[in-house]
Image (cartoon, grey):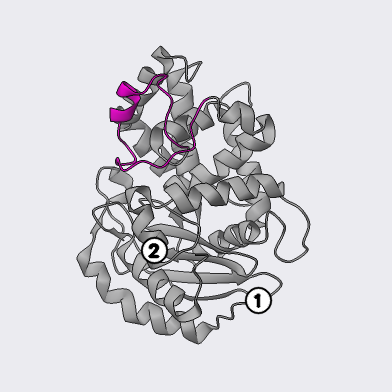
Amino acid sequence: MIKIDQSDLIKWLEHVRIYANNGKVVDYIPALANQQPETNAVAYYPIGGELIFTGQAEYKFTIQSISKVISLAVALIQHGDQAVFSRVDKEPTSDPFYSVAKLEVEKPAKPFNPMINAGALAVTNMIRGRNSEEMVGEILKLVRVLANDEQVTYDQDVAQSEYETSFLNRALCYFMKQHGVITGSIEELLEVYTKQCAISMNVKQLARIAAVFANDGRDPDSNEELIPPDVARICKTFMVTCGMYNESGTFAINVGIPAKSGVSGAIMGVIKRCGGIAVFGPALNEKGNSVVGIKLLEKLAAEKMWSIF
């Protein structure tokens, strides 16, 4: 068991705060542009232990691309891996998460993995529901179970802001619909996708979700199965290979844990059979990852020997 106490979190968060000056808050989603770079927090949820945290741990942010892990889990639970991977591939890519380039040259035009936007849209398109409200409900149902909080929901303002500016994601959807990768209404799919990205929580809740994956899909307190272990394994594998956008290889070398980031500045990390960690810092590097979050995880991983490699 890797032991982390609050003094570790306080020490390293104070040590890395300055790196926020090296990043930039995302501005292509208007509702996120007013986030403050100095807002930073970290929480660690050990399996069978007590949550520890520091910084602005009550501050709520939208999870953005971290939701791709949750929607993948929902689709795998509902349809099985064979059906899911008939729509999306399993391979990393060096292209940015928003890229359309590989869709144009691959035959069939299947997204490389579920962690890029095209792949996540294809996965979300599979979630059951007679309409967008029911589909969003399926995602929220799992999120609330993992976070152990029935109050978790999405930020309506951020969802609307993303929906109104999702021009590139619309293009990805129409391209994939042309090639039979997705079906149904593009606008309904974008409504679901932008709401899943706008799911709002703090680092304490996100760390608990990470702890479920660290415990192979089981509740970190009761040990009750919340996600089938094979689904948890698949999700964690994608987090290692694709979870940090096209910085995943560097992150694997420097930190070496399954992790998923979002452009809000959140990172969810999984320390196998030990616990889950969540970091928030909205200043991003050129790859779209939190500069404070990356530095903090690098420091802790080196000190605690987290790497799975």
Q: CA distance from mark 1 to mark 2?
A: 29 Å
According to the picture, the residue beneath numbered tag 1 turns out to be 50
**Residue 284 falls in which quadrant of the image?**
bottom left
Q: Position of residue 217 (x, y in %)?
A: 68, 54
According to the picture, the residue beneath numbered tag 2 turns out to be 253
Count of all numbered marks drawn on residues in the image: 2
In depth, the one of 113 and 24 nearer the eye is 113
In depth, the one of 107 and 133 nearer the eye is 107
Any magenta on residue 276? Answer: no
Q: Amino acid at mark 2?
A: Ile
- Establish if 265 lies above or below 14: above
Q: Position of residue 306 (x, y in %)?
A: 51, 71
- Secondary structure beneath label 2: helix
- Establish if 12 lies above or below 138: below
Residue 241 visible to an observer of this rendering: yes
Left or right: residue 136 versus residue 262 is right
Q: Amino acid at mark 1?
A: Glu
In depth, the one of 92 and 162 nearer the eye is 92
Which mark lies nearer to you, 1 or 2? Answer: 2
